[in-house]
Amino acid sequence: MATGPRPYKIWNHDRSLKKSVTASNLEELIAKGKEKLGIPASEYVRVALDEDGTEVDEEDYFTFLPFNSTVILLMEGQTWRPEGSEHGTDEPDFMTSDGRQVSDRVRMLTTGLNKDMSRLITFSNEDLQELTEMKAQDLAQMLLDTEEYAKAVQEACRRFLDERQQTSEAMELLCLYHKARECSPYVNDEGEGNKRQKFSQT
């Protein structure tokens, strides 16, 4: 579905240069971003959300980004880092209550949720599943909130997973039904039979 241009803010990889652009699609954002940040047009870049490092590599996902979203363009070999880490301030690793280190991915997800809880609907099924499998007390510490709040977030994750599963199953059934109708020799015959019955009654 075609959309009009929307405003975005773009950083270079170390957040030393920030520009504003308007773009209607992901390809246009990348092209304009390269030009404004002085990146060669032939250079391959990845687009990541500034707040949590989520990579934006699909047009469908791009269309759901809010107006004035801030993204970072990353060239080959460059990686997203939390804001402030460019100056060598290492963030301590977070350990769970049973002594395991939390993955960078989970840290990025919870950082994004701390800034905007509505981002939950954009998480992949794998991300949602990982959050539901965490201990509530560990998730609460990462969300800087109570354990009850963490449990509510996990319940929301489960609901989204269930809804997506139901939608997926419904689509599969529709596809099977459509294929069955295409392959059935009786579909057109039934239509012709109904027509003949109507004519015979007149």
Image (cartoon, rainbow, N blue to C red):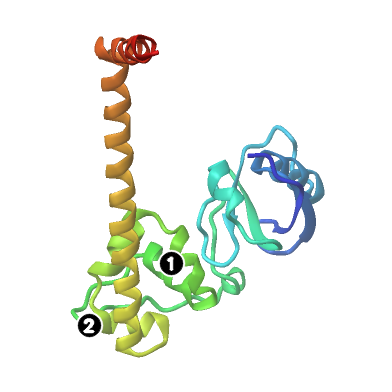
Residue projecting furthest to the left: 98
Q: What amino acid is labelled 2 in the image?
A: Ser
> Which residue was labeled with disc 2?
97
| Residue occupying the point 45% across, 62% down | 121
**Displayed quadrant of residue 85:** bottom right
Residue projecting furthest to the front: 202
Q: SS at mark 2?
A: loop
Task: Work out whether 192 lies above or below 39.
Answer: above
Q: Position of residue 38 (x, y in %)?
A: 79, 46
| Residue occupying the point 29% across, 20% down | 181
| Residue occupying the point 62% across, 73% down | 87
**Displayed quadrant of residue 96:** bottom left
| Camera-side mark, 1 or 2 | 1
- Whether residue 167 sits left or right of residue 113 in the image: it is left
Q: SS at mark 1?
A: helix
> Which residue was labeled with disc 1?
109
Near mark 2 (Cα within 10 A), the count class, few <14, some 14-19 or many ≥20, is: few
Q: CA distance from mark 1 to mark 2?
A: 19 Å
Q: What amino acid is labelled 1 in the image?
A: Leu
Near mark 1 (Cα within 10 A), the count class, few <14, some 14-19 or many ≥20, is: many
Q: Position of residue 198 (x, y in %)?
A: 37, 15
Give the mark, 1 or 2, whose residue is nearer the N terminus.
Answer: 2
